[in-house]
Image: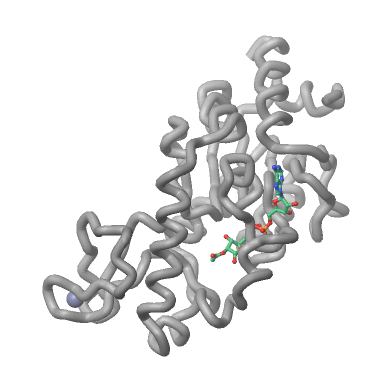
Amino acid sequence: MEFSDKLIEKLSKAKNVAVLKGAGVSAESGVPTFRDPGGIWEKFRPEELANFEAFMRDPDFVWSWYQHRREIMRDVTPNAGHYALAEMENLFENFDLITQNIDNLHFRAGSRNVTELHGNIERNFCIKCRHFAGEIDITEKKVLKCEKCGGLVRPDVVWFGEMLPMEALRHAEEAAANADVFFSIGTSAEVYPAAMLPVIAKRAGAYSVEINLNRTAISYELDETLTGKSGQILSELVNKIKEAGK
Ligand code: OAD
Ligand code: ZN
């Protein structure tokens, strides 16, 4: 991939770099995305699964679907994109990785400064007393009951209609507003408020770059779209940044 001189120059001067990433970054690890052909929302309707009412209507069904996703995530490994993002953390004074993914692959690749906007599938809490469950058996398809009060236990992920964790969102907005360069990677940028972040960054003066297989709903607002697989583009980009003397 040919990178523009402008991008490399911006990156070689940048102090604050932030990234919003989505399901596309984990696609090369074998985790299905949501909105691509064959993606999760083609097989299931979000309203049947990813909301509180659906959970109350049929807790075992929703729980077993998350258990199934946990099994997928247990069996996959980080890809070149995750490793490149972990490396980028060492190349800039401030590097914020803001993720919509709930899959932990970024931590497994070595990233440390990660802001999770949509929760984390490894955590579970009781809807009645908010007690967090310890380690769980991910093969058990029946919904877990709270060890303290017997209430239903749900995954600590953000469902449709729910608020994002306030502190994570506040931090992400601040990182976007302060970024010299902002990347939006492997996300369709259709789910708000996350999709607002690249635009916040752009309007606050960041050089804004998208990495995706295709153009997205927000491409026209940004400075560049690099089309291709994030794993490959990010590895090449890291090499280029290092060559430029970072
Ligand atoms: P989507 O499935 O909406 O979008 C995935 C994006 O990744 C698409 O734009 C693809 O073109 C792109 N893509 C796929 N493979 C890629 C690759 N190898 N390299 C680069 N890009 C690639 O996923 P998200 O934008 O993450 O929310 O979805 C946002 C939210 O919607 C998710 O966090 C989830 C879902 O409902 C919750 O669960 C709260
Ligand atoms: Zn409880």
Residue at position x 42%, y 78% from top? 61
Furthest residue toward left: 148
x, y percent for residue 16: 60, 33
Residue at position x 69%, y 41% from top? 183
The answer to whether residue 237 shows anywhere in this view is yes
Q: Nearer the viewer, residue 39 or 93?
A: 39
x, y percent for residue 235: 66, 25
Looking at the image, residue 83 lies above or below residue 142 = above
Q: Nearer the viewer, residue 32 or 201?
A: 32
| Res 229 → quadrant | top right
Q: Quadrant of the N terminus?
A: top right
Q: Quadrant of the C terminus?
A: top right
x, y percent for residue 189: 71, 58
Residue at position x 84%, y 40% from top? 224
The answer to whether residue 174 shows anywhere in this view is no
x, y percent for residue 88: 57, 27
Looking at the image, residue 12 lies above or below residue 179 = above
Q: Left or right? Give the position of 164 relative to 208.
A: left
Tell me which image quadrant ligand 2 sits in. bottom left
Furthest residue toward bottom: 57
